Amino acid sequence: MYYYQFNIGDYQSHTSHLSETEDLVYRRLLDWYYLHETPIPLNEDEVSRQIRMRSHTESIAIVLQEYFERTDDGWIHHRANKEIAKADEKSVKASASAKARWSKKDANALPTQSDSNATHNTLPITQDTEHKIQKKAPVVATPVGVSDSVWQEFIAHRKSKKARVTQLVIDGISEQARIAGWSLEDALKETIVRNWQSFKADWVKDENLSKTGQMNQRVISGLTRGLIGGGNVKLLGN
């Protein structure tokens, strides 16, 4: 949205403790949020680039932690979400009113100025305006190393959980897969099989330890057989 109401008194009562830099960060973050109507990226370097404050990542982190909520899709602002939902609802009602008036007129009549204003730049109608931001997700291409069948199944799985598939989500899962020592495709498969919404390295930590233990047991068994059989055992690194 290109316009939103700004209550000076309300803003100052909640931000009087901010430094000049932090105050500027907050204003720019709000402007970006209302303009794009999408969660703010989790990557602070990308955020600093978007709001043109590359040398103030520390202030950005402080403001995000205090005024926004971190989600898998990015940082969200509940007050801004409500204002966006109100604007959406108002546009929907204005459009419905204009259509009702039009239905009573001759189909060949020219639109009046008020009708034109009522229908201009109206936002698309969604079933749940409170979650409109969540539904504006760009199409994400199949990641490198992930088969198309697994990717399509993952998209369907996320859709069943009413969760978006964004590049930020995939980057987050990819990073957690790297930490766990898994491939991205295996992490996506595990997410589907376990009926998880996302993937965290900590969730499979016990499995990784179990696999490591099994591997160590096989190595020890091999060494034992070699010693008992009198064979030469060559250790790694020798």
Image (tube, rainbow, N blue to C red):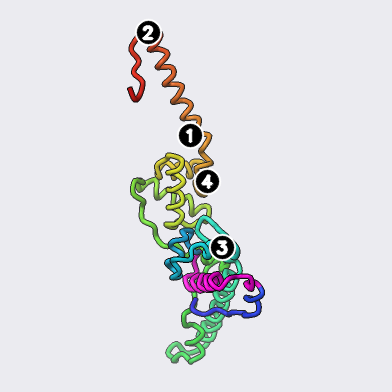
Tell me residue 219's x, y (percent): 41, 21
Secondary-structure class at tag 1: helix
Tell me residue 9's x, y (percent): 65, 79
Mark 4 or mark 3: name the one nearer the start of the chain. 3
Mark 2 or mark 3: name the one nearer the start of the chain. 3
Magenta region includes residue 99: no
Per the model, the C-alpha gap separating discs 2 and 3 is 64 Å
Highlighted range, magenta: 14-39
Decide: marks 4, 1 in contact (CB < 8 A)?
A: no
Q: Quadrant of residue 97?
A: bottom right
Mark 3 or mark 1: name the one nearer the start of the chain. 3
Instruction: Say what amino acid the circle numbered 2 marks.
Output: Gly
Q: Quadrant of the C terminus?
A: top left
Task: Name the residue carrying label 1.
Answer: 208
Per the model, the C-alpha gap separating discs 4 and 3 is 30 Å
Q: Residue at x 50, y 34 (%)?
A: 207
Task: Name the residue carrying label 2.
Answer: 229
Callout 1: few (<14), some (14-19), or many (20+) C-alpha neighbours within 10 Å?
some
Total numbered labels placed on residues in the image = 4
Per the model, the C-alpha gap separating discs 2 and 4 is 48 Å
Mark 4 or mark 1: name the one nearer the start of the chain. 4
